[in-house]
Amino acid sequence: MASLVRAAFSVSKNSLISTSVRSISTTKQLNIKEIREKVEGGNIVVEAVNVPSPRTELLVRAENLGPLKTIDVSEAVKSDKAPCYMCSLGLDVKHTDVLILSQFVRSDGCMLPRRITGLCKRQQKKIGKMVSMAQKAGLMINLTPANCKKDPTKRKDYKKFNTYFDETTIFMKNVPRWTDRFKFRQSAK
Amino acid sequence: MSAAKRVQQWATFARTWHVFDCKWQDPYESAHVIKKYLMGLHKPIYHPMNDCGDVVVCINSKDIALRGNEWRKRAYFHHTGYPGGASWTLAWELHNKDPTMIIKKAVYRSMTGNLQRRHTMQRLFIYPEDKVPEDVMQNVTNQIRQIRLVPTRLDHIPEEEVKNFPKIMDYPEDYVLK
């Protein structure tokens, strides 16, 4: 009985307070922010500073390229939907292209979610897999969590040796063995 | 025989020494390239009965790259001949014991098993690092092109270049930089 009363009370409280606090604004409430921490005396001051996006000036979009733009037919979705910015650029990105892949990760090397990258589902999956390939190959060791063994040669067992990856295996359901050449050739096409 | 013809004769039948840098190369792919030079298959005078193979010096064999999960999936089989004498060594374990063994076995297996194979293998020199004895290095006159590009690590690219590289993804307007 007591739990029932408590639950009812919390529901009513939440509904009341959340509606009263919620505000309506006609402009964007939020901007790109940077969290800065500094120590003043014995206190840590955390502040969110509005910053302009560092990437806007260097941004490459297929519609701005004019006649140069190429659409990769295999990658572009064959539906009525407009292709996402990555599909319409038609770039052949490999897992060794760290300058491109590092744009899609946080500072700890974690892939950004699709609501932030704005990619289509297929490209999000493809780039996410290529990011993990680059991380496993030790190509983006400055974008890793703090507890990570950064130098690949200091990793354990098989992880300390050089590994490369084949991008055609990204969308394969079963990756055939290297010795199984017939199957491999069929699926690679 | 004119002087030009005599030089051509020498150049045709001389043994050339090639160097191959194994850094970030797949040993099973590069074995097919190395094999051609060792057996002399790249020469128009090639015949299985004539001894026209070249010498190949492999350097940096400890920096070979295997594809995907092959370091932990590929096993090397050995049998002592006694009952229960079979053993399977994983590729990373073998590479820990001897960093030249994987490339050696790959080249050996890429050739057909005949009486010539062991003599051809004698012309293959493998060194785990780029330190090669002087008497070997002084003979080298050619370099075999690498099969795959050596990847560049992000922390080895200058920070200015990373900053000014054309960007594809821009942050949404309400993003908190991390």
Image (cartoon, grey):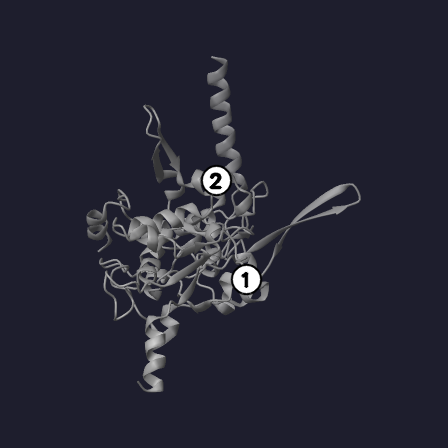
Q: Secondary structure at mark 1?
A: helix
Q: Please determine whether, in this image, residue A158 is positioned above or below residue A120.
A: above
Who's the residue at 35% across and 62% down the image? A92
Instruction: Pick the residue in front: A97 or B107.
Output: B107
**Can I make out residue A118 in this image?**
yes
Residue B80: image quadrant is top left
Q: Percent x, y for residue B120?
A: 33, 55
Instruction: Pick the residue in front: A85 or B90.
Output: B90
- The amino acid pointed to by label 2 is Lys
Q: Percent x, y for residue B174?
A: 51, 54
- The amino acid pointed to by label 1 is Glu
The tag on residue B109 is none
Which residue corresponds to mark 2? B97
Who's the residue at 36% across and 53% down the image? B121
| Chain of the residue that carries numbered disc 2 in the rendered image | B
Q: Percent x, y for residue B167?
A: 47, 64
Which of the marked residues, 2 or 1, is nearer the chain's N terminus? 2
Relative side of B20 to A54, left or right: left
Q: Percent x, y for residue A118?
A: 40, 55
Who's the residue at 46% across and 54% down the image? A104
- Circle 2 crowding by C-alpha within 10 Å: few under 14, some 14–19, many from 20: few
| Chain of the residue that carries numbered disc 1 in the rendered image | B
Mark 2 → mark 1, Cα distance in angstroms: 26 Å
In this view, the residue farthest toward the top is A1
Q: Quadrant of the C terminus of chain A?
A: bottom left
Q: Secondary structure at mark 2?
A: helix
Residue B82: image quadrant is top left
Which residue corresponds to mark 1? B134
Which is closer to the viewer, label 2 or label 1?
Answer: 1
Q: Please determine whether, in this image, residue B6 is positioned above or below residue A169.
A: below
Q: Are marks 2 and 1 on the same chain?
A: yes
